[in-house]
Image (cartoon, rainbow, N blue to C red):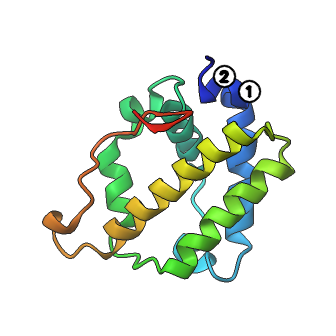
Amino acid sequence: MTSLFEHAGGEAALHRLEQAFYDSVLADPLLKPLFGDGQPQHVDHLTAFTSESFGGPDRFSREVGFAHLIAVHRGLKITEEQRQRFVELYMEALDTTGMPDDEPFREAVRSHVEFGSRVAMQNSHAESDDELHPLREVPHWNWDGDD
């Protein structure tokens, strides 16, 4: 079975997805407070993270590191409404960028984004390291979830 990374079309396709998604969150009144005016490197980081998680190169771990991901979410106090909107916009970006629309792929992506957004929300409320989600590395997602 091919990896989610290959099925998605590789890094170039995932970059288009992350760019469309990022543009949508920057324009969304509910999510804009979390992202501000945006960061120029954010789409590249999102692309590297998703690529690695879906079975592509480990560039996120090598160049950015998971500790950075924890740090950028701390203190954001993400609400459940914001988390759900994040997932909704991500799934919409799959359509707008022409990503594969087969049910197994879409379900795998949805479960990945649901999981990741819950980790981010927990970390955004953590007052201490003990309250952080225990995940400390990029999850390796496959057709059935995290392996």
Is residue 53 shown above or below 26? above
Tell me the distance, in whole angstroms, between the alpha carbons under discs 2 and 1.
5 Å
**In the image shown, does 37 or 49 lie closer to the viewer?**
49
Residue tagged by mark 2? 6
Q: Amino acid at mark 2?
A: Glu
Q: Is residue 37 visible?
A: no
Find numbered disc 2 in the image and state the secondary structure of the residue it sits on. helix
Q: Residue at x 34, y 51 (%)?
A: 68
The quadrant of the rendering that contains the N terminus is top right
For the residues labelled 2 and 1, say whether their Cβ atoms are less than 8 Å apart.
yes
Q: Residue at x 44, y 26 (%)?
A: 58
Is residue 10 shown above or below 34? above
Q: Amino acid at mark 1?
A: Gly
- Residue 8 vs residue 97: left or right? left
Residue tagged by mark 1? 9
- Residue 86 vs residue 45: left or right? right
Location of residue 13 in the rendering, given as x and y in whole percent from the top left corner: 74, 33
